[in-house]
Image: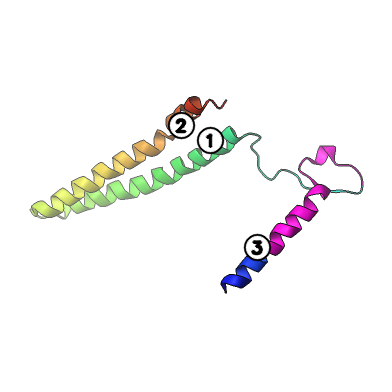
Amino acid sequence: MFLKSNILILYILIFVLLAAPFYYLNAEECPPGVICIQNPLKAESVEEIINSITDFLKLIAMGIGLIMIIWGGIQILTAAGSEEKLTKGKKTIMWTIIGVAIVFLFDFIVGFVLEIIGAE
């Protein structure tokens, strides 16, 4: 199985390397008789791609965070005097808020890292 997957990867790599000179990524500069591939991404730079990813993660984090805060509230409401269940519900809410805060700080973290490495 391992050998077959390596051979498949080798065939794909050879195809890509041999076909690369015949493809252009920008259709506006496509000469006649050559197959051109348009850029499938809406982003034109790495920064735009990173911003799109962080926006998507924020959306997911908001949904999961809302569900987890509700779940933590249910744990607290159904604790029925049990100190262990009450603590578990409080920790669920606390870690959910910390996780969502980290996801919302992605823009600042990415900007800080890009500033440190000198990327523009």
Q: Which residue is mark 1?
A: 51
User: Which of the two discs, 1 and 2, labels the residue nearer the N terminus?
Assistant: 1
User: Which of the two discs, 1 and 3, labels the residue nearer the N terminus?
Assistant: 3
Q: Which residue appears at 18% of the width and 51% of the height?
A: 88
Q: Which residue is mark 2?
A: 107
| Range shown magenta | 10-32
Disc 2 marks a residue whose amino acid type is Asp
Dot 3 crowding, Cα within 10 Å, few <14, some 14–19, many 20+: few
Disc 1 marks a residue whose amino acid type is Asn
From the viewer's perspective, tell me whether residue 99 is left or right of residue 76: right
* Quadrant (top left, top right, bottom left, bottom right) of the N terminus: bottom right
Q: Does residue 31 belong to the magenta stretch? A: yes
Q: Which residue is mark 3?
A: 9
Q: Secondary structure at mark 2?
A: helix
User: Which of the two discs, 2 and 3, labels the residue nearer the N terminus?
Assistant: 3
Disc 3 marks a residue whose amino acid type is Ile
Q: Does residue 46 belong to the magenta stretch? A: no
Q: Nearer the viewer, residue 103 or 20?
A: 20
Q: Nearer the viewer, residue 39 or 24?
A: 24
